[in-house]
Image: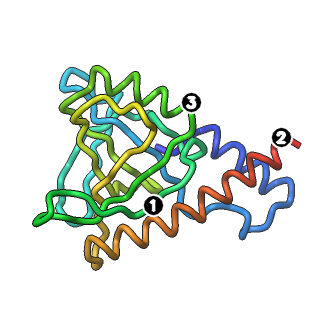
Amino acid sequence: MNSFRLAAALSALLLAGCTNSDIPEEIASIFVEAAPSVGGSMSNEVRLPVSGLAIRVMTRALVPAEEILGTQPITSGDPDLRQEFLLVQLDRKSAVDVMNYTNEAIGRHFVLVINDTAVGIMPIDQQITDGNLMFHVEKKGLSNTEAVMDVSRRLNISALKIRKLKEAERK
């Protein structure tokens, strides 16, 4: 499920002599829930690790790893039902793609996938125009707050490494 472009770039950089500390360990991408009419070869089933919720997603990511700018833990919800979410900030290109997609995808879900493992889900309740996505995150053995903090920290490290790799590629 990982972005082919990113995988090719990482392979080229490894061959060019980058150290292992330069290569991100977590590759996150955002996939969209497949419509019921989509055939089996165009979708894959992913399962969230704690709830066990299974979702069929398209085989190609709507937002590849290199288009995720960063993440941040946030608290949201009604005062008596507040919980932690992972805010994922997208670059301009992906923000436009998400805006265009969500215009007609209300009722479906976004799924955050790290290294082929689903870790978060976000319902599409309305068109998203700002490039900010809020995911409920799950990780075995961790509370909601701990999972959000851990995933955010790890993805920010990877996003920084990917940006550095992209800058090195331009030179």
Instruction: Residue type at mark 3: give it.
Output: Lys
Q: Earlier in the sequence, mark 2 or mark 3?
A: 3
Instruction: Residue type at mark 1: give it.
Output: Gln
Q: Earlier in the sequence, mark 1 or mark 2?
A: 1
Q: Residue at x 54, y 47 (%)?
A: 68
User: Is label 3 in a helix, a strand or a loop?
Assistant: helix
Residue occupied by mark 3:
93
Q: Residue at x 34, y 71 (%)?
A: 147
Q: Is residue 154 above or below residue 64?
A: below
Relative to the observer, which residue lies in front, 169 or 76?
Answer: 76
Between the residue at mark 1 and the residue at mark 2, the CA separation in whole angstroms equals 28 Å
Q: Residue at x 37, y 24 (%)?
A: 101
Q: Earlier in the sequence, mark 1 or mark 3?
A: 1
- How is the structure coloured here? rainbow
Asked where in the image residue 110 lies, by quadrant, the reply is: top left
Q: Residues within 10 Å of mark 1 (few under 14, many from 20)?
A: some
Q: Give x and y (percent) for residue 14.
A: 78, 57
User: Is label 2 in a helix, a strand or a loop?
Assistant: helix
Asked if the residues shown at circle 1 and circle 2 are in contact, with their CB atoms under 8 angstroms apart, the answer is no
Residue occupied by mark 2:
170
Farthest residue to the front: give it. Answer: 79
In the picture, the disc for residue 72 is 1
Asked where in the image residue 125 lies, by quadrant, the reply is: top left
Q: Number of labelled discs?
A: 3
